[in-house]
Amino acid sequence: MASSTISGQDPGASARIEDLVQEVQRLRAEKEQLQRAVTSHAVVDQAIGVLLTMGTISPDDGFSVLRQVSQHTNTKLSSIAEQIVKHAQGVTLPDTVLTELHSALARRR
């Protein structure tokens, strides 16, 4: 303690700096999580738009279809949404997803 007093440093400064570093790390992680959530939400909205044109269903039904396909294929909803958006651009859907998609859309009609 005498050495820190002699050198002019506050003995609690290191602890405060460490607290600030941890807070910055926490905020960065939170920012990244929020960015992923916003991106995922945008893709889900796009997929719902695709489903609206495919199945002439409401936006609420579009989300329900995404959720059902996600649950029945044991695939993340955001992944299903990405696949559906790509499908609208000409990419073939996996057979299991396509089958579940048609089934879910049929249940909504």
Image (tube, rainbow, N blue to C red):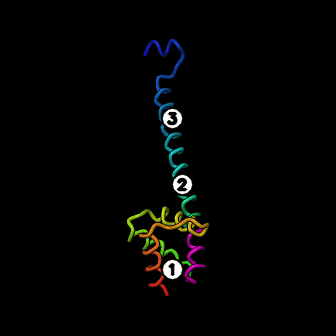
Q: Which residues are magenta?
A: 46-57
**Mark 2: which secondary structure?**
helix
Q: Residue furthest bottom?
A: 109
Q: Nearer the viewer, residue 8 or 73?
A: 73
**Above or below, 21 relative to 48:** above
Is residue 80 magenta-colored? no
Which amino acid type is shown beneath numbered disc 1? Asp
**Mark 3 against mark 2, which lies toward the viewer?**
2
- Mark toward the start of the polypeptide (2 vs 1): 2
User: Mark 3 is on which residue type?
Assistant: Val
Main SS of the magenta segment?
A: helix
The label on residue 7 is: none
- Amino acid bearing label 2: Arg
> In whole angstroms, how far apart are the C-alphas of marks 2 and 1?
24 Å
- Compute the Cα span from label 1 to label 3: 45 Å
Q: Residues within 10 Å of mark 1 (few under 14, many from 20)?
A: many
Is 53 inside the magenta-drawn segment?
Answer: yes
Q: Residue at left 43%, top 80%?
A: 103
Residue 36 - label: 2
The percent coordinates of residue 7 (x first, y second) are 52, 13
Up-down: is 55 above or below 21? Answer: below
- Up the image or down, 46 lies above or below 17; here it is below
Relative placement, left or right, of 79 versus 45 is left
Please, what secondary structure does the residue beneath circle 3 have? helix
Within 10 Å of the Cα at label 3, are there few (<14), some (14-19), or many (20+) other Cα atoms? few
Q: Position of residue 99 (x, y in %)?
A: 43, 75
The residue pinned by badge 3 equals: 21
**Residue 5 rendering spot, x and y as whole percentages:** 49, 15
Mark linked to residue 61: 1
Quadrant that contains the N terminus: top left
